[in-house]
């Protein structure tokens, strides 16, 4: 039985493990944490609508359900040419036929970034955001800033949607508590039109949302630094804030940057359409760790990471059976999300032919809640998987 080593236990790595096990490969999954984290539903942890443990799935339960081997450890180095992986514990892994790299991305580090917290950072940061919000609510008033950044070397590495979602959920939480008029909510981003990748119609609707919720906009100024009491922009103007939630753009994983793997200017692994790493045999990269090629609006999202992972499982199987019907990720490039607002949601979709944003009052919120439960149960094999989800 051929052996596959997977580095990373997020959406991409776990999906690859599940589908490779379906084809009876000997799979070892390496993850630096002992749980799978459902990031899209983490937006409700800070508002207290969801418990932290409810969006964590024990990897040992997933291991039992699917039959892969599990190593909970961090990756220290990757030596692709010599097919040698060194873990933070000092253990060395070199007995594998295929390597799938799914370690995600690092984050760009602006000056003073420690003065902010990110809903897309380490999972525990969602709890720290909740603590900050609870402190301000106990105080009875405050100024809160939400924002996200960009990576000039790779525009696909921007992740702003969760920032908008958390903003709108906090707005609705404060409104329900009768405190909204006591808080100043701000949204900032260095690009002139944050969210433009979703399409013009969606951009206009987002502006309407921001106006309706009385959110002050600060767009088009590069971020110079973060301080305890606010954000400094390139013109030295300051956005005052008692608490700042900021999602940095993705950057090449530090382990990848120091490896012999081929990288684009941002440090993401260069791959072809079939997720094969350029210049290496039987090594694949999927999800945020990979350099995604395509139109300017392309974005790294969980559903694309899973498509890439399933394709890799298929492509490995094709190779083992001496067949050539490989699958690529390019035809699946799109933006797809249900952007939650706490009292509803909006369905967002974009591809090369169309861009749509459809309001889903009330029901959209519960649809996304339902997806979170579906994600957990389907990953555990407790309910059937819906094709494409």
Image (cartoon, grey):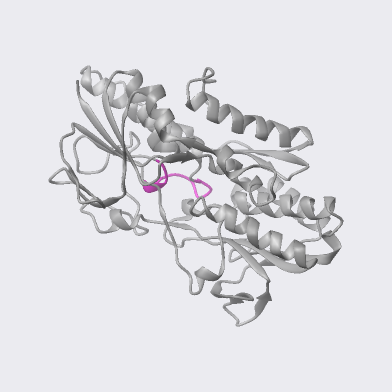
Q: Looking at the picture, how far across and down is residue 146, in whole percent?
A: 65, 61
Q: Is residue 218 left or right of residue 158?
A: right
State whether residue 193 appears in this view: no
Q: Quadrant of the C terminus?
A: top right
Where 155 falls versus 310 (above or below)? Answer: below
Residue at the image position 35 percent from the left and 55 percent from the top: 253
Residue at the image position 65 percent from the left and 42 percent from the top: 50
State whether residue 296 appears in this view: yes
Q: Quadrant of residue 106?
A: bottom left
Residue nearer the viewer, 217 or 16: 16
Task: Examine the structure image and report whether residue 248 is included in the region drawn in magenta.
Answer: no
In this view, the residue farthest toward the left is 82
Q: Looking at the picture, how far across and down is residue 270, in whole percent?
A: 31, 47
Q: Quadrant of the N terminus?
A: top left
Task: Examine the structure image and report whether residue 297 is included in the region drawn in magenta.
Answer: yes
Q: Looking at the picture, how far across and down is residue 172, in whole percent?
A: 79, 50
What are the residue bounds of the magenta stretch?
287-299
Where 188 falls versus 88 (above or below)? Answer: below
């Amino acid at each position: 039985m051929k052996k596959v080593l997977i580095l990373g236990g997020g959406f991409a790595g776990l999906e690859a493990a599940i589908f490779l096990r379906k084809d009876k490969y000997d799979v070892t999954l390496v993850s630096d944490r002992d749980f799978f984290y459902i990031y899209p539903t983490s937006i409700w942890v800070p508002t207290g609508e969801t418990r932290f443990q409810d969006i964590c799935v024990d990897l040992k339960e997933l291991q039992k359900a699917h039959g892969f081997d599990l190593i909970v450890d961090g990756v220290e180095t990757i030596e692709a040419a010599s097919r040698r992986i060194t873990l933070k514990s000092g253990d060395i892994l070199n007995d594998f036929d295929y390597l799938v790299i799914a370690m995600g991305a690092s984050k760009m580090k602006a000056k003073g970034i420690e003065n902010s917290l990110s809903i897309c950072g380490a999972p525990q940061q969602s709890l720290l955001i909740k603590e900050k919000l609870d402190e301000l609510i106990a105080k009875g008033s405050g100024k809160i800033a939400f924002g996200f950044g960009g990576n000039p070397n790779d525009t696909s590495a921007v992740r702003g949607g969760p920032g908008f979602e958390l903003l709108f959920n906090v707005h609705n939480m404060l409104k329900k508590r009768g405190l909204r008029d006591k808080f100043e909510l701000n949204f900032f981003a260095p690009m002139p039109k944050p969210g433009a990748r979703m399409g013009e119609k969606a951009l206009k609707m987002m502006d309407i949302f921001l106006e309706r919720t009385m959110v002050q906009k600060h767009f088009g100024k590069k971020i110079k630094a973060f301080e305890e009491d606010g954000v400094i922009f390139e013109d030295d103007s300051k956005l005052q804030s008692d608490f700042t939630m900021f999602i940095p753009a993705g950057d090449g994983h530090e382990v990848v940057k120091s490896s012999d793997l081929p990288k684009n200017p941002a440090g993401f692994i260069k791959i072809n359409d079939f997720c094969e790493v350029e210049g290496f045999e039987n090594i694949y990269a999927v999800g945020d760790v990979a350099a995604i090629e395509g139109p300017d609006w392309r974005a790294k999202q969980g559903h694309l990471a899973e498509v890439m992972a399933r394709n890799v499982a298929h492509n490995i199987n094709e190779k083992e059976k001496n067949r050539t019907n490989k699958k690529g990720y390019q035809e699946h490039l799109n933006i797809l999300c249900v952007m939650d607002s706490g009292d509803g949601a909006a369905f967002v979709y974009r591809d090369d032919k169309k861009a749509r944003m459809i309001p889903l009052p009330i029901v959209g919120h519960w649809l996304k809640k339902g997806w979170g439960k579906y994600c957990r149960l389907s990953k555990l094999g407790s309910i059937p998987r819906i094709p494409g989800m």
